[in-house]
Amino acid sequence: MLRVYLQRTIPICLLIVFFLSGPAGAKSLWTPENGDLFTDQKASRLGDLVTIIIVEQAQATQNAATQASKSGSIGVGPGLGILQDLLPEITGTGKDALTATGKTSRGGSLQAKVTVQVTDILPNGNLFLKGNQEITINGEKQEIVISGIVRPQDISGDNTILSTYVADAQITYLGDGPIGDRQKPGILTKFFHWLF
């Protein structure tokens, strides 16, 4: 009897639950905000991090050469009238020569890795990056400040980019501390350079 009752009641309960419950919605683990499932996550939003690999080398050489010469002569004859016997004939020549050469050579290199943030997204989709890194060793503070514009397609899959791909790059490398202070000229040296 109980068995027959259960056989009739269970299907009726299942039908009631089926009709009373709303439509079933399957939720996906992937959402459009997460990006593409098959590619690496690149920086594309405000606050995303990008590591800039700084590999800057600069070398400049300038040569200058100047060569100039000038010569001239002057002559005055004897005077006329009464002064004819008093003033003898006078002649003179002069010559001036200048030769100068100069060479200026300057070079520098900087290699570092600095992780920066996306601080602005430009209307054309390019990203403005800005950040700094500060290291203090034995009281000597070194700071690298970098900013610039990059194209999103130039950022690699691991969110790194070479500094040579950064447009309008501003890279500043500063040192402050006892060693840096010794690199600067003293007050007397500055005074004599100003004087002479």
Image (tube, grey):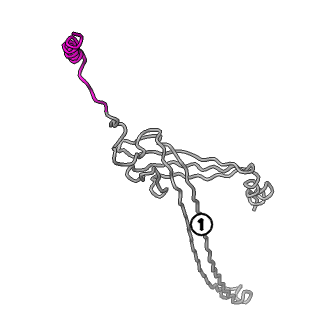
Residue 150 image point, x, y percent: 43, 50
Q: Residues within 10 Å of mark 1 (few under 14, many from 20)?
A: few
Q: How many marks?
A: 1
**Residue sitting at x 60%, y 47%:** 133
**Residue sitting at x 64%, y 82%:** 97
Q: In which quadrant is the N terminus drawn?
A: top left
Residue 73 image point, x, y percent: 63, 85
**Residue sitting at x 34%, y 48%:** 38
Q: Amino acid at mark 1?
A: Gly
User: Which range is magenta?
Assistant: 1-27
Q: Secondary structure at mark 1?
A: strand
Residue 88 lies in the magenta-colored region:
no
Q: In which quadrant is the C terminus drawn?
A: bottom right
Q: Quadrant of residue 31?
A: top left
Q: Which is the main secondary structure of the residues drawn in magenta?
A: helix
> Looking at the image, which is closer to me, 70 or 47?
47
State whether residue 73 is above or below residue 13: below
Residue 80 appears in the rendering = no
Residue 26 lies in the magenta-colored region:
yes
Q: Is residue 28 left or right of residue 194?
A: left
> Looking at the image, which is closer to me, 67 or 14?
14
**Residue sitting at x 53%, y 60%:** 55
> Looking at the image, which is closer to me, 11 or 49?
11
Residue 11 image point, x, y percent: 20, 16
Q: Is residue 179 left or right of residue 170?
A: right
Q: Quadrant of residue 102?
A: bottom right
